[in-house]
Image (cartoon, coloured by chain):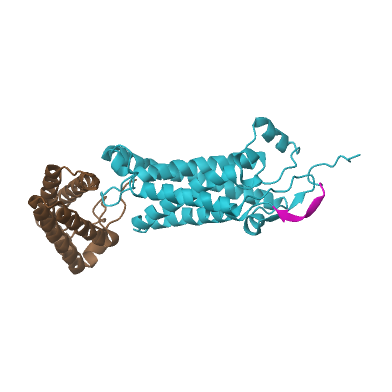
Chain colours: A brown, B cyan
Amino acid sequence: MRIRFVAAIAVVSLSAAGVAVAALPKNKALAIMHARHEGMEKIGDTNKLIHRELASSSPFAPAVKSGAATIAALAKQSSGWFPAGTGPEMGKTGAKAEIWQNQKDFAARLAVFQRAAVTFNAAAASGDMTATKARYADLIGTCNSCHDKYRMDMHH
Amino acid sequence: MPRQIPHGYAPLSRRQRVWDLPVRVVHWLLAGLIVFSWWSVHNHHTDWHIWSGIAILTLLIFRLLWGFFGSSTARWTGFIRGPRGVVDYLRGRWYGIGHTPLGALSVVAMFLALAVQVGLGLIAEDEDGLFFGPLSILVSTDTSDWARDLHETWFETAILGLVGLHLAAIIFYRVRGKSLTRPMITGDAALDSRAQPMRPGKWWVALICLAVALGIARWVVAGAPGLPH
């Protein structure tokens, strides 16, 4: 009985490994997807604040600085947000399945985003508003470059 | 002594002008831009979507002004009628030119619905904080997010509903033997001989209206400088 149970598990895991989405248990996958969603939402909310500051005639530098630091920290975490098995087949997500079909391209774009977040954070920390605005525009460009290809609407 | 002629059998004069060029151009540009706005926002072209909204804003301002200074059939006072006018029309006692008293209600509803839609879009921001309506900086992020949700709901209900009604009316009249589409393309229609001919507006007035509309749209794109942030 016990042996049969173990054998069944072995078969299931092997077949799962066969489609290369193995290893990640469902609860772990969902936890990562949740963290990803929260992190992305936080980046979005921070963008909304930074945009308003930078569009204002007298931006409040400390708000931009702390926002830039928030995004840089989240960008760093984002490396762990897209393991195989956390796509739309697992649950509700804005991440398209294409991410895992083009892993190399996706990883490259994510790296460009992470570098842009670091550069923007440095510019904001320096207090140079002109440079901050330029680096922020670069950063937004990297968000769009990925979202255009790999993000889908998830509301409703 | 005039003979009483039942509606529908009125003698039709030869084709004459009913819609001037600005009315027709605004109409078809609006139709195209509404489709384009819908397409662009569903295909990751939010930047184009915003510019399309600005173009619609410009057309609405122009049309508002042309409704005061344009041709007789373009004027608000020329076609907006009270309930009695609508009832008279439904009973076949309307011999006018241009929008019927019932159609006028639809025109006003469409104009207002589009104005609300553009207004919401101007203060909206996208979910990810990557795209912003030019006036979103005047309101809080909560208001902008709320405006985006309503912008979407308003499109799916009011705008699509009115577009549907509009298309249904076109089919209804077509079935009854009257084309509404052709006059909106050529500008001419066979009219009831009792109708007053259209009094055309001046081309240079249209240019002034356009210049004012473009000026206001430009100011909006710049974030409405001068308004308190």
Which residue is more in the foreground, B185 or B178? B185
Residue A85 location (% of width, % of height) = 19, 58
Q: Residue at x 25, y 51 (%)?
A: A91
Screen quadrant of the N terminus of chain A? bottom left
Which residue is more in the foreground, B32 or A85? B32
Residue B16 position by quadrant: bottom right
Residue A75 location (% of width, % of height) = 13, 54
Residue B171 location (% of width, % of height) = 64, 51
Screen quadrant of the C terminus of chain A? top left
Residue B135 location (% of width, % of height) = 33, 44
- Hey, which residue is sitting farthest right in the picture? B1
Q: For residue B222: magenta?
A: no
Residue B15 position by quadrant: bottom right
Magenta residues (range): B10-17
Viewer can see residue B94: yes
**A2 in relation to A66, above or below:** below
Count every numbered label the image shows and give the total.
0
Which residue is more in the foreground, A109 or B75? B75
Taking the image as shown, residue A120 lies to the left or right of residue B55, namely: left
* Prevailing secondary structure class for the magenta stretch in the rendered image: strand
Viewer can see residue A80: no
Taking the image as shown, residue B98 lies to the left or right of residue A155, namely: right
Q: Residue at x 56, y 51 (%)?
A: B206
Q: Residue at x 23, y 62 (%)?
A: A99
Q: For residue B16: magenta?
A: yes
